[in-house]
Amino acid sequence: MNKYQRAPEHILDFHGNTVKEVEEDLNAFMRTNSFKYIRIITGKGVHSQNGPVIREFIKKYLSKKMIRYSQSKPQDGGDGALEVFFE
């Protein structure tokens, strides 16, 4: 790891969950934690008939709350993960 990289303080894995489960878990997580940087594993939506449902839901959820996020680098999950920043 170079000096510009840092590891997430926490990783949430929602791969395989429903939107309802994800929303409940995110709401609970946001109320009880004070991390500055986390990674959320969303999965790529390969097995979903309508594409990446969880990833799109989480992006909208974070945007609505004005929480900054970016796509993970390929070695960190690529299209199946998001880097989330609370600072």
Image: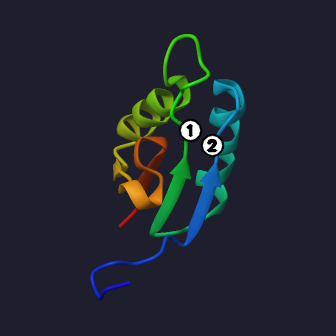
Residue closest to the far bottom:
3
Mark 1 closeness class: few <14, some 14–19, many ≥20 residues within 10 Å: many
Where is mark 2, residue-wise? 27
Q: Quadrant of residue 14?
A: top right
Q: Nearer the viewer, residue 66 or 60?
A: 60
Mark 2 closeness class: few <14, some 14–19, many ≥20 residues within 10 Å: few
The image shows residue 35 at horizontal and vertical percentages of 52, 69
Q: Which mark is residue 32?
A: none
Q: Residue at x 65, y 35 (%)?
A: 22
Where is mark 1, residue-wise? 43
As drawn, 30 above or below 5:
above
Q: Quadrant of residue 23?
A: top right
The CA span between labels 1 and 2 is 19 Å
> Disc 1 residue type?
Gly
The image shows residue 16 at horizontal and vertical percentages of 69, 33
The image shows residue 13 at horizontal and vertical percentages of 65, 49
Question: What secondary structure is found at the residue carrying circle 2?
Answer: helix
As drawn, 72 above or below 59:
below
The image shows residue 56 at horizontal and vertical percentages of 44, 28
The answer to whether marks 1 and 2 mark residues whose Cβ atoms lie closer than 8 Å is: no
Q: Residue at x 56, y 38 (%)?
A: 43
Question: What secondary structure is found at the residue carrying circle 1?
Answer: loop
